[in-house]
Every structure is written in structure tokens, then in C-alpha cells.
Image: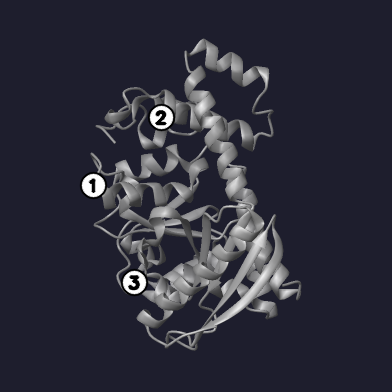
Amino acid sequence: MGVLMGPARDAIISEADAVEFVALNYPPSEGSCRSRMARFVLHIAAEAGLDLSGKELRDWAASTEANVALNDALELWQDKQAERRLRLIVSLHYALAEDWPEALGAWLLYDNDFYRHKDFNCVPDQAGVEEALGEAVDWAEEYARELGAPLRRIEVAVPTSKLLQWHPEEVQYGQRLGVNYEVLTRWSYRMESISSVQRLNINAWKRLKEIAGLTDVGRINWLAGHQVVESDRLRDELRAGMYTRAIGLIEDPGDNVSLLELLLIYTPIVVWPQFGPVNAEHRRRVDACWNLLPAEFITAYRTRWRAEGIADPLADLRAVWDDEEWLEFCKSLQMGRA
């Protein structure tokens, strides 16, 4: 990212404002905004249910001299859709209390249907869990070859006690796991088959729909330190529905596991910084690429790992992103369809 220009964060209240932001903020190495703009417009069109090969998009590309960029973006989009036919879900939900688990659960989904399930025993420490995670990827890759479908997405369900310190995308699998896979972090507690968790997930569904419907405001309630320091007051505010969007922490929560757990009970999306406090640049970046999240976090981490140019502000952030796909998986698991 270069020097941020365009509308200030408070002025990014619509897709038009986000388009302006993308047009004025892109990696200098790309030479122009066409590539990023084509990706952004394509995602907006897909979200709106438009024909991605239709006349409207072609006319837009012709009018902005972005035909090549749109073709490239469409090819990338189609590749991504093909890659998402196969999903590996690996969970640490067998863990007791704050311990590392003695086994990982792994599910392979093909076209969103359960295809295979296997548990992987492990030594109950970080090294043991990471070794078992690698074994689960090996197992999934064998079926990927059998099906002729690439494995790109790996969703790792993590208990609250490990979310703040353990980064699944950095697990060594020859290279970092996130180099070749889209690694998403989920909250493993949502998988529990008890009525209280099922109610949490129902509320999470409703929150996601509310967030998706926002067009005139940012989609994150950013909370400062003084707003979260009193847990009883924060719990009362959350119970009362005061925060109706995703929740972002402005300051690094450190090892405050209870704070993260409290927030996840009431919202399906929580974002927090891992390097210093969140600033206006972070907020603008999140607003501008909301439709590309959470996958864009992995793109930003890769850029930082490779030290390619100026780091993307997204690389400073971490997130638990329990979207509709994750909630649907948890529901299916709880209903015994796995």
C-alpha cells in the first residue's frame, strides 16, 4: 500500500466510496488500479447475483480500458470457485480446558457435502498438534488427487485459549501452511452439540445478515481499551444488543482470553491487532476490502512473509471469521449429518 488518499474512513459509507478508495490506493508495483478494481467490481457483481460474463461488466471494462484486467479477474474468480469445491476442516475442539488436545478431528467436504472424516491422535502439546495437522493435510491431499479437485482451503477450528497465541497459517508444512493454502481460523466452540451453543449460532446467523445488509456505515464496531476493560459492563452492553456489527479491538488484547471469548459469544466476527494499536489506515483498509475478507488476510500475511514492497496494513490484524459456511458446517455436525 502506498500513502493512503481518497475518502477518510468516516466517509467510506457506500460501495462508491470504496471504489474511490481502491482507485486511489493500490500497490505501486502494479502500476495502476485496474487489477484491484476489476477484482473488487467482480466481487460486488457476484454478491449481487449478476452474470459475471454479462454485458454490464463487459461494458464497464470497455469504458475503463480494463478488459484484460477483467478477464484476469474472472479467470482468478473461476479458479477460486473450483478450488472451494474441496474444503478441509481440522478442529482442536477435543481439547479439555486450556490444554492442547490429544486428537484432532478432520472433515473433508466436497461441494459442501461431507465426504470423509478421520481423527488424528497426537501428543497434547503444540508440536504434536502441528504434526497431526500436517498429517491431516496429507490425508486430504490423497483424496484431492483421487477426486481431481485441488485442495486450497483449510479451516482450522481453534479453542479460545489458543486463538491469541497460535497461528495455524504459520504451521510448517514444508513451507508455512498459508503459503499454498487459504487458511481460515474458526472458533471451535461453535461445534459443540449443546442447546446453548446452538442458540449462539442462531444469533450469529442473524448478526451476519445484519452486517451484510449495512450500506451506509462501516461494518465493524471498533472498541477502545476503556470500552472493554470493565467486563461486566461490556457483557451487559452486548446482551442488550448495543453492538450490532462485527467487533474490532483497537488495542492488542494480549493474553486476555476471557475478553475474546465474551466477544465471540455475541458476534461471529472479531478482529484485533497483533502489532500495535489499530489506526485509521487499518480501518480504511478493512472497509475498502470487506468483500474480499477473510481470504485477503492470508494474501496480506504472504506479502509480509516475502517482504514484498510496503506491507499491507491487513497483515497487522488477526481475525476469527465465523461466516455462513462455518455456521452451516456446525449445524450439520450438531444434527449428526457428518
For numbered disc 3, what is the local secondary structure? loop
User: Left of 206 or right of it: where is 131?
Assistant: left
Q: Residue at x 60, y 38 (%)?
A: 78
Q: Which callout, 2 or 1, points at the residue further toward the start of the chain?
A: 2
Badge 2 density bin: few <14, some 14–19, many ≥20, Cα 10 Å = many
For the residue marked with disc 3, what is the amino acid? Gln
**Where residue 68 sits in the image (x, y, percent)?**
49, 20
Residue to which mark 3 is pinned: 165
Residue to which mark 2 is pinned: 22
> In the rendered image, which quarter is residue 167 located in?
bottom left
Q: Which mark is residue 307?
A: 1
Q: CA distance from mark 2 to mark 3?
A: 32 Å
Q: Residue at x 46, y 78 (%)?
A: 132
**Where residue 315 sits in the image (x, y, percent)?**
32, 51
User: Left of 215 or right of it: where is 274?
Assistant: left
Q: Residue at x 44, y 33 (%)?
A: 12
